[in-house]
Amino acid sequence: MRSLVFTGPDQVEWQERPDPKVQNSKHAVVRPVVIGRCDLDVGFVRGLAPMAPGTPLGHEVVGIVTDIGDDVHDFVPGDLVAVSAQICCGECKMCRRGFTGRCEAVPFAASYGMGRDGDFGGAAADLVLVPFADAMLFPLPVGANPADWIGFADMAQDGYRAVAPQLAERPGARVLVIGGAASVIGLYAAGIAVALGGIVDYYDSDTARLTEAKKYGAKPILRGNDEPEGMYEIVVDASIHAESILEAFRYAAPEAVVTSVCIHFGDVTAVPLMEAYHKGITYKTGRPNCRATMEPLSKLCCAGHFQPQLISTKAFDFNNAPEAWLDPAIRTIATKAAF
Ligand SMILES: [Zn+2]
Ligand SMILES: [Zn+2]
């Protein structure tokens, strides 16, 4: 089979790999019909996020189950599914607590397509081995268009965790999203926050992203022209710039929650702890727990309140996935023509 592989900065190619097979009773094999590029993939392929040449890529997948092991009870061949970007067993202590991004049954933070330990390969491939099918797969609704659900495996969960639990505690709160390198995730956070009743301002210097944020019902604020007004109970830092942490804390209201959905790659990033102390700010970062939040987020999607696909999307033929990974568009997908 073909697997999409990072071979160096701005270089992505299909390479041949052995076909995965069901070797364990909990395994399934999925044939992707749509694959999507994550914001983190953009960092990888541009050489901004660390990745060794030769690493398989891809962790945003919707596909069809083609084979299952004897102990897979919730899925059968032919099912249309989203595949969790993270490898999770569903049974360990962390998975049972909902920390499915921190599964203890596999190497730490094991995932598809990120060069992590465990050698689970990339999900941008002709076939994907799913080691814990019942725990990792999510059934898409009957009649779902697979392309509409790209982003659901990881990016939308990342946006969800940054605003949904926070809005549940603070209904109708003002939300500020500081847009940036985590482009789609920041926009998803804005869209999900609007869907959940937040009053959302989206602050960015990128006019294309501001236009997309407006589609989701957020108020766009062009950096350099204008500034956020007042303070916010929920702040999402989707910018890779260290200064965005300072901004996020400055705009945070007393008892606010600030979440960085981007990765600050330096070992040390300045955080204004004095300001955080006085305001009583909670700061969160880290990976989302992709599988754990799929159920509640799918309800928002099925009701039409949140649409991952609303962001302008450049579609490629599946065979041309290397181009999709290198394209400057905000959101790209690669689809099998047959579907
Ligand atoms: Zn991702
Ligand atoms: Zn687990």
Image: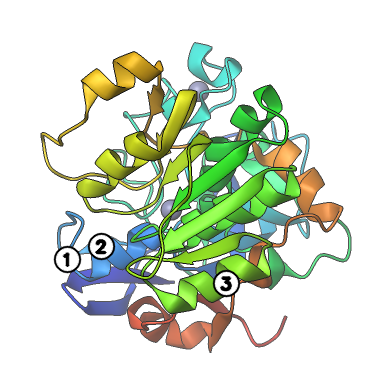
Is 116 positioned to the left or the right of 29 in the image?
left
Nearest the camera: 310 or 120? 310
The answer to whether one can see residue 290 in this image is no
Question: Residue at label 3?
Answer: 212
Image x and y of residue 57, in percent: 35, 62
Q: Are marks 3 and 1 in contact (CB under 8 Å)?
A: no
Check disc 1 and report the residue beneath it: 47
Q: Amino acid at mark 2?
A: Phe
Disc nearest the viewer among 3 and 2: 3
Query: Is the distance from the Cβ of mark 3 to the nearest ligand 1 atom less than 8 Å?
Result: no
User: Could you tell me which residue is drawn at 51 percent across and 53 percent down?
Assistant: 155
Q: Secondary structure at mark 2?
A: helix
Q: Quadrant of residue 272?
A: top left
Check disc 3 and give the amino acid type. Glu
Q: How far separated are the C-alphas under marks 3 and 1? A: 26 Å
Earlier in the chain: of badge 3 and badge 1, it is: 1
> Of callouts 3 and 2, which one flags the residue occurring earlier in the amino acid sequence?
2
Instruction: State the residue in front, 150 or 176.
Output: 176
- Provide residue 141's location: percent of width, then percent of height: 84, 55
The span from disc 3 to disc 2 (Cα, nearest Å) is 23 Å
Q: Is residue 262 left or right of residue 217?
A: left
Left or right: 161 with respect to 287?
Answer: right
Badge number at residue 44: 2
**CB-based contact (under 8 Å), mark 1 and mark 2:** yes
Q: Quadrant of residue 138?
A: top right
| Secondary structure of the residue carrying numbered label 3 | helix
Q: Which mark's residue is nearer the viewer, 3 or 1?
A: 3
Q: Residue furthest left?
A: 267
Specify few, some or many for label 3: CA neighbours under 10 Å numbering under 14, 14-19, or 20 or more: many
